[in-house]
């Protein structure tokens, strides 16, 4: 793992036109953040929903927009902000409308499949995978914020055959908006994110299914929930349109961790049914200690 943060916002003088394909929370925040930090180039929004693009322009996240891929024709850099299952299809379409020198990147939470598929289908495309680890359960450009990436980690993928010049441009992009850029192989990224992001989402969803359904006596248990229930289930509000492709694309690491989670809960159930208060106390205390150790990291 290599930390590439420079501590200073690097200029993006080599990017005169930036195209944002799909201007939702992340790409909308990227446009706002660049403008707030003095990016002098042109920012073009591209996508299929004119209403969304118009809203992004009204917010100042983009300068102009178009619903046809040709709107990105002059782009030096294109950042794709779509669900991960269509990212490569979008890039393939864009390559028919842009210059050979154009650099492509993305913001998806899964990297290995996209990097591998892009290399196989589009060997001449200058693609660099990226994942800004920022956002919330809220979607849409209406929730975009110029400070979303301040101090946030952003992974930029690297590996054999990587286009170092293109990678440098993508790293500078994210440094410019305040991110701490880290370079990782795509498969390593996916294993780490399965544990730190994808598993928490599916666990929060599972908890919601269990608690927010009808309890044994027919009462809504969720009605008695407080801050703990609210906080632990918050991420389950994330759009399934975004999350289904993520967990399916990263299926093996997520499935393995889900099995470990199920085993952890089964062990707890056994201790409770045995009335082993000492083992339950040790389990709870160890969890508290582990959480305390990572307080500064999240």
Image (cartoon, rainbow, N blue to C red):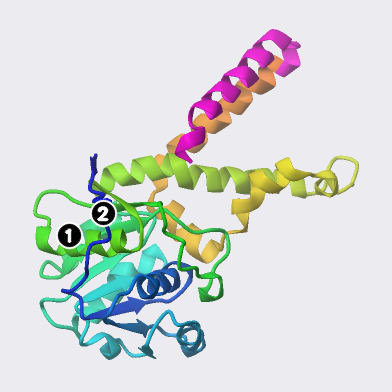
Q: Is mark 2 on a helix, strand or loop?
A: strand
The x and y percentages for residue 297 are: 45, 37
**Residue 49's mark?**
none
Residue 114 against residue 217 in the figure, above or below: below
Which quadrant holds residue 132? bottom left
Query: Label 2, label 1: how many angstroms apart (C-alpha)?
Result: 8 Å
Residue 120 % position (x, y) = 16, 62
Q: Is the magenta stretch mostly helix, strand or loop?
A: helix
Crowding at mark 2 (Cα within 10 Å: few <14, some 14-19, many 20+): many
Residue 252 in view (yes/no): no
Q: For this rendering, which residue is in front, 214 or 59?
A: 59
Q: Is residue 22 above or below residue 166?
A: below
Is disc 1 placed on a helix, strand or loop?
helix
Q: At 10% across and 70% down in the image, what residue appears?
A: 124
Give the mark nearest the N terminus, 2 or 1: 2
Magenta part of the chain: 272-298
Decide whether residue 276 is among the magenta residues. yes
Which mark, by number, is residue 167? 1
Determine if residue 216 is in view. Answer: yes
Write down the quadrant of residue 86 in the picture: bottom left
Going 12% across and 56% down the picture, which residue do you hit?
162
Q: In this view, does 49 lie to the left or right of 159?
A: right
Q: Residue 156 carries which label?
A: 2
- Residue at point 15% right, 70% down? 125
Q: Quadrant of the N terminus?
A: top left
How many neighbours does mark 1 have within 10 angstroms: few (below 14), some (14-19), or many (20 or more)? Answer: many
Q: Nearer the viewer, residue 2 or 22?
A: 2
Q: Does the magenta stretch include residue 84?
A: no
The picture quadrant where one finds residue 95 is: bottom left
């Amino acid at each position: 793992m290599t930390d590439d943060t420079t501590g200073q916002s690097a200029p993006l003088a080599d990017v005169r036109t930036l195209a944002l394909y799909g201007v939702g929370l992340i790409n909308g925040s990227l446009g706002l953040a660049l403008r707030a930090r003095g990016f002098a180039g042109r920012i073009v929004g591209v996508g299929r929903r004119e209403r969304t693009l118009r809203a992004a322009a009204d917010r100042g996240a983009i300068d102009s927009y178009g619903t046809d891929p040709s709107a990105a024709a002059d782009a030096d850099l294109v950042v794709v902000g779509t669900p991960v299952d269509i990212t490569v299809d979008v890039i393939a379409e864009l390559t028919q409308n842009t210059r050979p020198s154009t650099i492509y990147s993305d913001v998806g939470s899964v990297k290995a499949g996209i990097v591998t598929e892009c290399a196989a289908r589009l060997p001449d495309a200058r693609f660099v995978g990226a994942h800004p680890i920022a956002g919330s359960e809220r979607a849409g450009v209406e929730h975009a914020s110029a400070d979303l990436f301040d101090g946030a980690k952003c992974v930029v993928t690297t590996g054999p055959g990587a286009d170092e010049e293109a990678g440098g441009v993508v790293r500078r992009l994210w440094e410019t908006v305040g991110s701490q850029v880290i370079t990782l192989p795509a498969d390593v990224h996916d294993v780490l994110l399965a544990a730190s992001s994808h598993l928490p989402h599916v666990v929060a969803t599972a908890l919601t299914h269990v608690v927010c359904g009808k309890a044994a006596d027919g009462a809504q248990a969720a009605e008695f929930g407080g801050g703990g229930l609210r906080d632990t289930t918050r991420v389950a509000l994330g759009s399934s349109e975004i999350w289904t492709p993520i967990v399916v694309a990263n299926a093996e690491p997520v499935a393995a961790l889900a099995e470990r989670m199920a085993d952890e809960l089964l062990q707890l159930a056994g201790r409770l049914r045995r009335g082993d208060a000492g083992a339950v106390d040790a389990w709870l205390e160890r969890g508290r200690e582990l959480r305390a150790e990572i307080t500064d990291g999240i």
